[in-house]
Amino acid sequence: MPLSAAQTDVWRAQKLAPENAKYNVAAYQEIFGAIDRKLFEAALRQAIGESDTHNSRFVETKDGPRQISGSRTEFKIPFMDLSREADARATAIAWMQAAMYEPFDLENGPLFRFALIRIADDRIFWFMIFHHIVTDLVDAGYIKKTKEGRRNRYEVQAHMPLPEPTSRERAIGDVLKLLGNSRRKSSPRRSPLVERRRT
């Protein structure tokens, strides 16, 4: 499918400098207590496997750059035990900071990476890093994501202004209303503004 304006800008910038990691977005979650690694990894693989966004590739076509969602993306979840290091926390953070500068391959993916790092017998860092092109719309606030059981509910934020500076006095909802009126004239079936996707 076509890219958003923001995604297109990111895609072009990354194509011009494929080794640049400026669009990498990273974070870590500190987990207290013991975890079942096999169960944790299975749950993470299932969540990623059911997400269209995280199984996407971004390719160049004759019609311009396009986002392609395909089959489940294969990925590894490395585990490091640094609990015997003199300063395990500092060592783990240094490793994660270095990992932030490894570029992604937009055409072949995956556009995410994970790692589990043990810094003590009862303390683990869950490291995650994504390419900004797959997090753009949610991070920018144009789509609100809420969890409903095993499903995510995506809702367009109609009050948000259009991203182009010359059009910021118009809201997303104004465009949706216009498109809705056009659809009603051509077809009696109304397209929903809220989409549900499995993750």
Image (cartoon, rainbow, N blue to C red):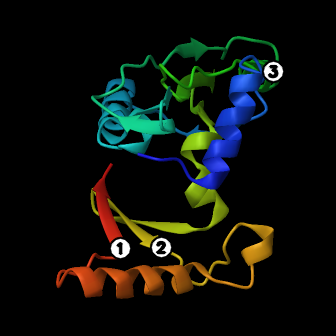
74 is higher (above) or lower (below) than 46? above
**What is the distance, in whole Å, between disc 1 and disc 2 at their CAs?**
7 Å
| Circle number at residue 141 | none
Q: Quadrant of the N terminus?
A: top left
| Label located before the other in sequence (1 or 2) | 2
Which residue appears at 18% of the width and 80% of the height? 189
Answer left or right for 135 relative to 50.
right
Residue bearing mark 2: 156
Q: Amino acid at mark 2?
A: Val
SS at circle 1: strand
Q: Residues within 10 Å of mark 3 (few under 14, many from 20)?
A: few
| Circle number at residue 194 | 1
138 is higher (above) or lower (below) than 159? above
Answer left or right for 179 relative to 149.
right
129 or 92: nearer the viewer: 129
Q: Residues within 10 Å of mark 2 (few under 14, many from 20)?
A: some
SS at circle 2: strand
113 or 166: nearer the viewer: 166
Q: Amino acid at mark 3?
A: Ala
| Label located before the other in sequence (2 or 3) | 3
**What is the distance, in whole Å, between disc 2 and disc 3 at their CAs?**
38 Å
Discs 1, 2 touching: Cβ within 8 Å = yes
| x then y, percent, for residue 24 | 70, 33
**What is the distance, in whole Å, between disc 3 and disc 1 at their CAs?**
41 Å
Residue bearing mark 3: 94
| Label located before the other in sequence (3 or 1) | 3
Which residue appears at 53% of the width and 77% of the height? 157
Q: Quadrant of residue 179?
A: bottom left
| x then y, percent, for residue 151 | 29, 59
SS at circle 3: helix
Q: Amino acid at mark 1?
A: Val
